[in-house]
Amino acid sequence: MAAMRLTVNITKWQIFRLSIPIFFSNLAIPLVGIVDTGLMGHLDNEKYLIAVSISSTFLTMIFWSFGFLRMGTVGLISQSLGKADYRELVYIILRNIFIAILISILIIIFHPFLIHVIGEIFETTVQTNQLIQKYISIRIFSAPAELVIYVLVGFYLGIQRTSISSLLIIILSLSNILFSIYFVRELNLDVRGVALGTLIAAYLTTISFLIYTYYFILKNYKVIPRFNNKRIFQFKKLFKLLNINFNIFIRTILLTFSFFWITYLSSTLGEEYVAINSILIQLVIISSFFLDAYAFSTEGIIGFSVGKKSEKMFLSCVKNSIILSFITGLVLSLIFFVSVKEIINLITDIEFLRYLSYKYALWVIIIPPIASFCYQLDGIFIGASQTKEMRNGMIISVAIYLTLSIFLVKEINNYGIWLALILFMILRASTLHYYFPKILNLFR
């Protein structure tokens, strides 16, 4: 799909059209988690499901902590596109790829420490702990590929080629699913199978799209992507990138920790609550990826409007994207209302896990429209590169959320985990709304 020609008045249809391919790619992402959970949930011991839930959530927290490799790339790329500075556009990609590889090496080196941290946090049986170690010892080596994918996705979102970024994610997710099914079902590799599936799929996708991106840039921008130390490592540009990335890093690590906190609180109630909440959180992730489609598609438009200094374009994009996101949240709630039990049954056939999951399914149903506001505001702030405000808003939200969650779990057990999560979504939206007027100063 060609890049959309943007006008001053950004319509709902323009946003929806850009979001369509992201819907499909974002649907593919949680399918990986659902398939992995389903593969483990249908084995003869719930410890496989618990081990994959804990270890994959922990690694997701680690990798998502470096989500600035996508988010920082989007804002800077779209702003460079608005200024028609194509050479700098290439250097932004190369800077972030260099940072991604450096971070990946450090993650791999320190992965024995990460395994130790999990053992200290979670009170699991010896068998569960052994399964966690098996998973992480394989999956950790996918870090270079997975983090470079963040950069590539950020580039294509920044230039409003959402169909290409979506194709990348779909190929990654589907190949992950196919490899995981083969390794678990045919080779009986249990947790090692789902970890290997992710590892192989990540490298195949990354190598393929790095080659594609080289020729894409050459064809569309008439720039040869080559490594130039002096241009890539300019102190001013590198400092700006690191400042933006550090703020997003703090914001993202707090966000991912908040979801990891759910797993921790669940473990304090018992291993069965880790299992059921991991099942239900997959549905929350499904809804978040659908809602994030609007945030992803508008990040590039917001950055472009900032680069063009067009406040009218910016405000029309903000208004229409928030409306679309909220309506989609209502639709998702309706879908979950009529099908949540069937989805749970697909994920696991362990009867007591099904029964417990049904008890808490209502929380999953009411989350999407409430969460739509914080997801969309995230995209607006990312596109405008207003990362300091995002960081501050997240610090405030997480501090209140952690305090409330501890109190609520003591009072109402597992219901408290889900009530605290909803309050967290409201806090995120409220703090970003407070900082929103600062974005408008960019157009003054």
Image (tube, rainbow, N blue to C red):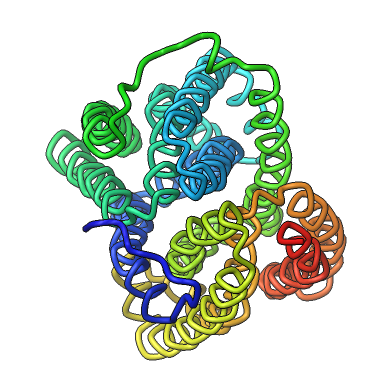
Q: Answer above or below: position of 365 versus 434.
A: below
Q: Answer above or below: position of 182 versus 391.
A: above
Residue 312 spot, x, y in % from top left: 60, 74
Q: Residue 440: which quarter of the image?
A: bottom right
Residue 335 spot, x, y in % from top left: 38, 86
- Residue drawn at (32%, 79%) of the image: 342
Residue 316 spot, x, y in % from top left: 56, 77
Q: Nearer the viewer, residue 157 or 133?
A: 157
- Residue drawn at (26%, 39%) of the image: 220
Q: Nearer the viewer, residue 289 or 271?
A: 289
- Residue 272 appears left or right of 387: left
- Residue drawn at (51%, 73%) of the image: 356
Q: Residue furthest left?
A: 186
**Is residue 196 visible to us here?**
no
**Is residue 150 visible to us here?**
yes
Q: Residue furthest top?
A: 229
**Quadrant where the image shows the N terminus:** bottom left
Q: Answer above or below: position of 276 versus 304.
A: below
Q: Nearer the viewer, residue 11 or 268?
A: 11
- Residue 70 appears left or right of 209: right
Q: Residue 421: which quarter of the image?
A: bottom right
- Count numbered badges in the picture: 0
Residue 138 spot, x, y in % from top left: 38, 24
- Residue 108 appears left or right of 139: right
**Quadrant where the image shows the C terminus:** bottom right
